[in-house]
Image (tube, rainbow, N blue to C red):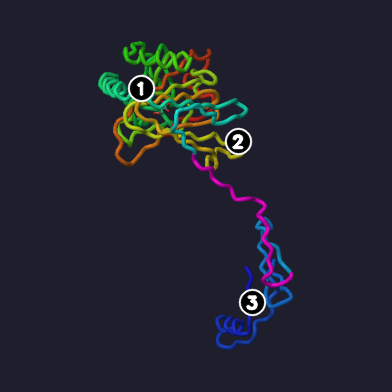
Amino acid sequence: MFYCPDVMSDKRQRARVQGSWAKPLPKQPRPAGVVPNTEHCQIAIPAPASWGIRPQATCGNFEFHQPSKPNREVPPEKVIDQAGVYEISHGPSGVSRLQLLPGFLPAQEADWMFSKLLAELPWSQKTNIRQGEAYMEPRLTCWFGELPYTYARSTMAANTKWHPLLLTLCEAIAKVSGRHFNSLLCNLYRDGHDSIGWHSDDEASLGAKPTIASLSLGDTRVFSLRKQPPPEENGDYTYVERIRVPLGHGTLLLMEGATQDDWQHQVAKEYHDRGPRINLTFRSIHPEPEGHRPGTKLRFTAKQE
Ligand SMILES: O=C(O)CCC(=O)C(=O)O
């Protein structure tokens, strides 16, 4: 900021302060940071040197210095919507990998499977605990597996009675992924207002570097991922990388490697018309070590609904 006082403005200033044509103001000590230059201008030196502007010898002759702290840009969100294998990050925990297979189920097969599972699975609304408060999940779920599954301080009892269609799907997915799954969490999003908050599937019972196979049926919803921020960001996700993966009818998504260590995922609410959607997430659950609290996270990321 700089300004050029002249006689008139000096008079105006005196008038405003003390009445018409008052005596000149006594000379004020110069405020810190204001230096007269050789012409009629004064330069107010901004206090922090990091702003990058330095006083110059003559008025109107400024040199721009790049601020020492460059502006940070929020990385643009990436979109994955084509079939393929994507290494989304390489970090100390290893490679995080997504495999997307749109059309894993042909549309007609996906249609009748969706209707059957919607009608025949034992859907219910689970109550979770967050910060000591109970809340209902904004979606319906059911669980199949030899072992109970605990997350968000609430346990889904073991349920060994698999629907025959789910057993067929589990085998088909094991074949394409080369992985064995012993458990399945089913989610039913009744409309766009149902959702699942940011979380990682990193409960100790899933073991290290779990592969999660996610099959979608029904209306398309956006599956979003965001990278875990480095420790110096203190849990601030503002500048992290983000990816969106639209998951349509019959699409299979595999999350592999360090994805659950280094990324979180969610299906956010959508406020325009969305029809029902079923998501089946096949996992492998292991008994938790003796003395280990069920449902404990490998890191402390709880689902935020
Ligand atoms: O509905 C989806 O696509 C994601 C489900 C999910 O994140 C989960 O079950 O942990």
Name the residue carrying label 1.
Answer: 105
Name the residue carrying label 3.
Answer: 4
Q: Amino acid at mark 3?
A: Cys
Pointer 1 local density, CA inside 10 Å: few below 14, some 14–19, many at least 20: some
Q: Camera-side residue: 204 or 70?
A: 70
Q: Secondary structure at mark 1?
A: loop
Looking at the rendering, the quadrant in which ligand 1 lies is: top left
Q: Is residue 15 left or right of residue 150?
A: right
Q: Is residue 245 one of those drawn in magenta?
A: no
Q: In the figure, residue 176 lies in which quadrant?
A: top left
Q: CA distance from mark 1 to mark 2?
A: 41 Å
Which of disc 2 and disc 3 is earlier in sequence?
Answer: 3
Magenta span of residues: 57-77
The label shown at residue 231 is 2
Up/down of 163 relative to 62, above or below = above
Q: Camera-side residue: 216 or 136?
A: 216
**Residue 278 x/y as whole percent:** 33, 26
Q: Is residue 73 one of those drawn in magenta?
A: yes
Q: Are marks 3 and 1 in contact (CB under 8 Å)?
A: no
Mark 2 Cβ inside 8 Å of ligand 1 = no
